Image: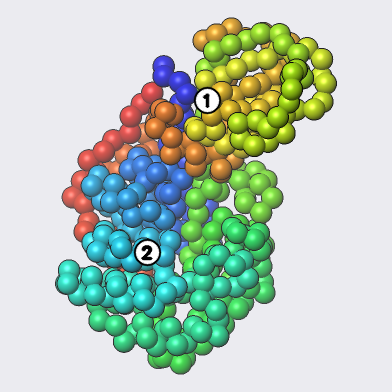
């Protein structure tokens, strides 16, 4: 079998998504399944839909377009603020987009009017993490202008935390988001369909028994794919943490000194070389590198330690295990390693399980919260078995 490869267990992804959907349903919160780390895979999207997610969210319009071409029967949300240059594509393929800039929303309005469609808008609010978001004091003015634009429907508000600055979701910022939603509804005489409280980092808050207020949506990706909460990366009870496995092939195995010799300068990536003398080690090199994954985000099996990586080589100490060329080592991944591995064209993607299939009868009914542009008559892509 080809290596390096990313083995993707669709049944485990389905299990993780279903468990989280059921957990949050008891709190009155729906799940938007995030497909960006899956590169918009129709099969992974299918596993999420069968598990009961209410919509699919992605940060790249290219991934949404790929799922549309595969006739994925779901409502699609662009969860990164659209690029003005892509307004036509966003309106054509996404039902809803997250926005922070009026100039962008005006572009979407113009594109939607030309396409004779109505495009849904969720306004993102800055609540401390300092990534994207409208400052709370400017929200009313942004809502007022958004409501005036033709072919634009204000669907709700949302926020994002724990990404850029690690600000944790909790009672304070979630209560603030609820208060902002209620203030908008009272001021403008409308009802917001979506109040999106955040991402996988919100799971501790959502399961703590705290009042969830108006929060009725979370956007979950990492917790589904890797089975971990994202504040401290702890495994979530009842979820699989090995739905994604990276497999790499050994191309050299030799006993070598642990310290380099000669005149020492920076490495190829501008780093300092190792300075600890470990004596001779069983150095095993695998045919995968920084062009394919984030070496710092790989968790090797017991008895193997990662020593470093270049563009194309992963160097490990295999200890007492003297591996031969052609042997394979299996790694678990963090989110950074997963993103890079999925994106690399040099890493094969191998799908296992049947949970990516969606028969016509399993297509979820459309709700008022998320109205797809076009429903599929049939699921045309089936899971591939390894």
Residue at image mark 1:
312
Rendering coords of residue 327 (x, y %): 55, 12
Residue visible at 42% across and 28% down? 346
Q: 195 or 124, which is in the foreground?
A: 124
Q: Looking at the image, how many numbered discs can be counted on the residues?
A: 2
Q: 302 or 105, which is in the foreground?
A: 105
Label of residue 327 in the image: none
The part of the image, by quadrant, that contains residue 254 is top right
In the depicted structure, whether residue 38 falls above or below residue 110: above
SS category of the residue bearing label 1 = loop
Rendering coords of residue 232 (x, y %): 69, 50
Residue visible at 39% across and 88% down? 144
The part of the image, by quadrant, that contains residue 231 is bottom right
Left-right relation of 148 to 16: left
Crowding at mark 1 (Cα within 10 Å: few <14, some 14-19, many 20+): some
Rendered image coloring scheme: rainbow
Quadrant location, the N terminus: top left
Rendering coords of residue 314 (x, y %): 59, 24
In the depicted structure, whether residue 380 falls above or below residue 175: above
Is residue 80 visible in this depiction of the protein?
yes
Please name which of the two marks, 2 or 1, marks the residue nearer to the observer. 1
Label of residue 82 in the image: 2
Q: Report the Cα–Cα distance between label 2 and label 1.
A: 34 Å
In the depicted structure, whether residue 120 falls above or below residue 53: below
Going from N to C along the chain, the mark reached first, 2 or 1, is 2
Q: 378 or 308, which is in the foreground?
A: 308
Residue visible at 43% across and 61% down? 80
Left-right relation of 33 to 112: right
SS category of the residue bearing label 2 = loop
Q: 247 or 204, which is in the foreground?
A: 247
Crowding at mark 2 (Cα within 10 Å: few <14, some 14-19, many 20+): many
């Amino acid at each position: 079998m080809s290596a390096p490869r990313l083995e993707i267990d669709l049944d485990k992804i389905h299990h993780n998504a279903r468990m989280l959907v059921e957990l949050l349903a008891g709190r009155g919160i729906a799940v938007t399944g995030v497909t960006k780390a899956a590169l918009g895979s129709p099969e992974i999207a299918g596993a999420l839909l069968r598990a009961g997610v209410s919509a699919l969210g992605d940060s790249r319009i290219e991934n949404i377009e790929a799922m549309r071409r595969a006739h994925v029967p779901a409502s699609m949300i662009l969860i990164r603020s659209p690029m003005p240059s892509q307004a036509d594509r966003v309106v054509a393929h996404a039902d809803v987009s997250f926005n922070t800039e009026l100039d962008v929303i005006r572009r979407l309005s113009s594109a939607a009017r030309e396409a004779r469609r109505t495009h849904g808008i969720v306004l993102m609010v800055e609540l401390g993490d300092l990534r994207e978001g409208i400052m709370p004091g400017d929200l009313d003015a942004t809502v007022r202008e958004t409501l005036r634009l033709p072919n634009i429907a204000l669907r709700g508000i949302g926020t994002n935390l724990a990404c850029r600055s690690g600000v944790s979701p909790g009672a304070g910022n979630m209560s603030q988001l609820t208060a902002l939603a209620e203030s908008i509804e009272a001021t403008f005489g409308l009802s917001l369909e979506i109040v999106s409280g955040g991402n996988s980092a919100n799971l501790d808050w959502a399961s703590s028994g705290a009042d969830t207020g108006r929060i009725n949506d979370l956007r979950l990706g990492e917790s589904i794919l890797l089975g971990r909460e994202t504040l401290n990366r702890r495994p979530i009870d009842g979820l699989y943490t090995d739905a994604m496995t990276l497999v790499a092939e050994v191309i050299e195995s030799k006993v070598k000194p642990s310290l380099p010799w000669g005149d020492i300068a920076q490495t190829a990536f501008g780093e300092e070389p190792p300075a600890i003398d470990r004596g001779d080690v069983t150095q095993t090199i695998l045919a995968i590198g920084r062009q394919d994954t984030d070496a710092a985000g790989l968790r090797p099996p017991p008895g193997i330690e990662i020593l470093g990586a270049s563009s194309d080589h992963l160097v490990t100490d295999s200890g007492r295990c003297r591996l031969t060329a052609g042997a394979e080592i299996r790694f678990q991944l963090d989110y950074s390693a997963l993103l890079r591995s999925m994106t690399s064209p040099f890493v094969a993607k191998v799908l296992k399980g049947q949970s990516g299939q969606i028969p016509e009868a399993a297509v979820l009914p459309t709700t008022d919260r998320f109205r797809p542009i076009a429903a599929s008559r049939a699921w045309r892509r089936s899971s591939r078995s390894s």
